[in-house]
Image (cartoon, grey):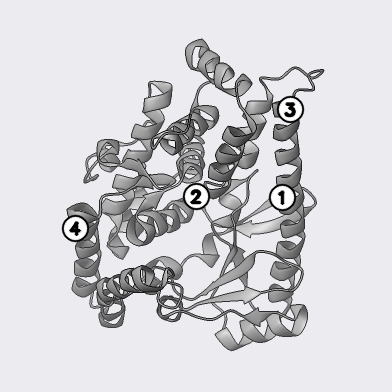
Amino acid sequence: METSRQPEIDFHFLSELVLTDPASSVPTNRIAETVLDLNRSKFESIAELAAKNHVIIRAFSAMSQFYKIDERTDVAHWVLLAIEEENSRIRHALGFLNRICTTLEENGCPVTVIKSLDHWPDLGSDLDLYTDAEPAHVVNAMVANFGAKVDQRSWGDRLANKWNFIVPGLPQLVEIHIGRLGQTGEQTAVSESLLRRTRVINIGQYSFRVLAPEDRIIISTLQRMYRHFYIRLCDVIDNATLLESECVDFAYLRSLGSAAGIWEGIATYLTVISGYIESFRGQGIALPAVVTGSAKFGVKKVHYRRDFLRVPILPDSLNLYASELKTLLLRGQVRNSLRLSLLPGLATAAALELKITGSDKGIW
C-alpha cells in the first residue's frame, strides 16, 4: 500500500543499491527481498526517481545482479528493458555531444564538457558545456552547423551568461556556459583557469575534454549548495567516486575555493556526502582535517524531501551566500559582487512566479 513516506523509502532503496558494499550480507539480503518483491507500480515509481537522480544504469545494473541469467520474471524483464532504453538514449546523446564539441572547436570555440559526463555510465538530462569564446561565435556555430535554435533565456540565464540550444533530432537541451559560472555569473575566479586544466577521456568510440577533479567538485558545489539547495543521489556517488580515487588536490581545491568565496560550501558539501555514505557503508569518505574543520554542517541537517536530499536554506545556505559575497567584495570584484547581490531578489521573484504560474522558467 502506498503511503506518504513511500518516495522516501524508494530513495533509501536506490541509495542502498548504488552505495552499499556488495560484500556486506545484511543490506544485500534486504535489497534482494525488495527487488524480488517488486510489482509494476512500485517498479515504475523507482524508475522515475532513478531518472530524476541520474542513476538508472548504476541502480538497475546493481538490481539485475539479483536475478539469475535464466530467469524470465516480469521484474527481470522490466529491469533489462529500462537499462536498454537508457543506454539507447545515452548513445544517441553522445553522438550529438561529440559532433557538437568537435564542431565548436573547429569554429574557434575551445570547449569542455561540464557536469553531464560526471555521472558516467549514466548521463545528465541536459548536455552541458563551457567555453570562453565570444557568444556570437558560439551561437553562429550552433545555428549554422546544427540548425539549432536558442531557447528562451531567463533573467538568470542572462546573468549567468548561459545559452540553451534546441537541436533538431536531440531531445536534450544543449546548455553552454560562456566565460562565467555561478547562478548570477559571479564566478570568474573559477572560470579563468577552467580550460587550461582539462583532460581528455575516452567513452566508447568518442573522446571528450572534461574538467579536472577539483573543478568538477567546485562546479558541483555551486550547483547544489548555492543554486538548487538539494543534492541528488548521482551527486553523492559521483563525488564519492572522485574522492575515493585519491586524485583530488585538496590544497589547490582550498586555494581556488577560498578565492571564489565558496570554500566553506565545498567543505560542507563534501562532509555531507561523506556522512551520507557512512549511513550505508558504516564508514564515510576519509576527508582531510582542513575539509571537515571548515564544514558548517553535516548530513544530520540534510533531509529527504521531494525526490532529493534537501539542504537547509535558513540560516545555513544564507550564511554560505553571505560569505561568498563578502569575499568578492573584499577582493574588489565589484561587478561580480553586484551580480551576486541580485540573487535574493531573483530567487524571490522565481518563487512568486512559480506559485502564481506553476513555472519559474522565465526568471530562474
Name the residue carrying label 3: 74
Q: Position of residue 321 (x, y in %)?
A: 24, 63
**Observer-nearest of 362 and 176:** 362
Q: Position of residue 75 (x, y in %)?
A: 69, 28
| The residue positioned farthest toward the front in the image shown | 1
Does label 3 or label 2 sit earlier along the sequence? Answer: 3
Residue type at mark 2: give it: Pro
Label 4: which secondary element: helix
Name the residue carrying label 4: 319
How far apart in space, not on screen, are marks 3 and 4 (Cα)?
50 Å
Label 3: which secondary element: helix
Name the residue carrying label 1: 202
Q: Position of residue 242 (x, y in %)?
A: 50, 41
Instruction: Please tell me which residue is depicted at 75% across the width and 38% down the height of the picture.
Output: 81
Residue 237 left/right relative to 352: right
In this view of the protein, can residue 22 be seen by the observer? no
Residue type at mark 4: give it: Asn
Q: Position of residue 20 (x, y in %)?
A: 50, 24
Q: Nearer the viewer, mark 2 or mark 4?
A: 4
Name the residue carrying label 2: 213
Q: Are marks 4 and 1 in contact (CB under 8 Å)?
A: no
Instruction: Please tell me which residue is depicted at 46% across the width and 66% down the height of the picture.
Output: 193
Quarter of the image containing the C terminus? bottom left
How far apart in space, not on screen, are marks 2 and 4 (Cα)?
26 Å
Residue 226 left/right relative to 297: right
Does label 2 or label 1 sit earlier along the sequence? Answer: 1
